[in-house]
Image (cartoon, helix red, strand yellow):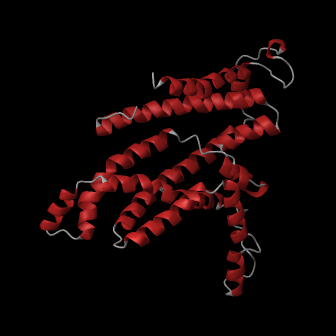
Amino acid sequence: MMVVPLLLLVIVFNYVPLFGWVYAFFKYKPGIPLSETPFAGLEYFRLLFGANSDIGNVLKNTLVMSFLNILTSPIPIVFAILLSELRGQKLKKFIQTITTVPYFISWIIVFSLVFSIFSFEGIFNTLLMQFGLIKDPINVLGNPSTAWYVQTAIVIWKSTGWSAIIYFAAIAGLDSQLFDAAKIDGAGRFRCIWHVTLPGLMPTFIVLLLLNVSNMLSNGFDQFFVFYNPMVADKLEVLDYYIYRVAFHGNDYPFATAVGMWKTLISIVLLFTVNKLAKKIRGQSII
C-alpha cells in the first residue's frame, strides 16, 4: 500500500500527459477544439523526414553534444579518486563543497557569469589585451567553430562535483582489506588506485555510462535556451530546444508533438539496446 501514492504520481505526471500525443495526428490550431480539427494522419511524420526538414542538423548537434559529454564522463571519476587521496579532511570537504555548488546554480545565473567573463568587455579579453596576447577581443560565445566545446566545458564545470559524489560513495564502500593486502604486497598509492580503486569503481561507471548512452537524444533545454544566439544557432539547436522553438515560436504544435514522439520512441529503443548490451558485457541488465 505504501507504493500506491508513488504509482499515482508516476501515472499522473508521466503517463496522463501522453494523451497529448494525439495532437501529432491532427491539424491542430490553438483555440479550435480537437473535435473540429481536420485529421492529418502521418503527415507531420512525413514532414519530419522530408527534403525540407532541418531535423538532420538538429540531430547532428544533439548527438555531437551527447558524444562530447560521454567522452568527458571519466572526469568525475578521476576527480573523485584524486580528492579521496588528499590527507587533510577539512581541505577535502572544502574542495568538495566548492565543486558541488555550481550544480545548484541556475542556467540563467551561469550564463550571466560566463557572459561577464567572456564578453568583449569581460575579464578574459581584458587580461589578454592588457598582456598584449591579442589585439582584438575574442568572441567566445558567438564563435560557431568552438560552440560545442565551450558548452561542453561549461557542463564539466557545472556537473563534475555533483557527479563525483556517486564515486565518493563507491570509494567509501570499497573493502579496506583490499588496500591493506595491496600495501603488504608492496603497492604504493598509485598501484593501489590502479589495481584496487579503479576496478572497484568500474561497475558504477559502466552503469552510468550506459544510462547516458540511452539518454543521448536528451541534452536538456535550459542550457541551450540561454546560450542560443543567431551566431551559433546552427550549432546549439538540439532536439529539446528545437521542439520548443517549433511549438512556441512557430505555433506548429502538431509538428513539435511529432518530433517529441519520434525522440521518445528512439530513446526507448536506445534504452533497451543498451540494456541488452549491459547484460552481455556484465551479465546483469540495468532495468
At a point 23% along the width and 59% down the height, the residue shown is: 195
Quarter of the image with the C terminus in it: top left
Give the quarter of the image for residue 58: top right
Q: How many marks?
A: 0
Left or right: where 6 falls relative to 140: left
The residue at the far left in this view is 185
Task: Determine the residue positioned at 44% across, 58% down.
Answer: 76
Q: Where does the image place residue 194, in percent across and percent down from the top left?
A: 27, 62
Q: Is residue 8 above or below residue 263?
A: above
Query: Which residue reaches farthest bottom?
Result: 131
The answer to whether one can see residue 279 in this image is yes
Q: Residue at x 34, y 52 (%)?
A: 170
Question: In the depicted view, which residue is nearer to us: 40 or 194?
Answer: 194
Point out residue 99 in the picture as x, y percentages from the top left corner.
51, 64
Q: Position of residue 85 (x, y in %)?
A: 33, 68
Q: Is residue 49 visible?
A: no
- Rendered view: 81 above or below 90: above
Asked whether, in this view, residue 8 is left or right of residue 128, the answer is left
Quadrant of the rendered image containing residue 246: top right
**Which quadrant holds the N terminus?**
top left
For image coordinates 50% across by 22% down, the residue present is 4
Q: Position of residue 97 (x, y in %)?
A: 50, 63
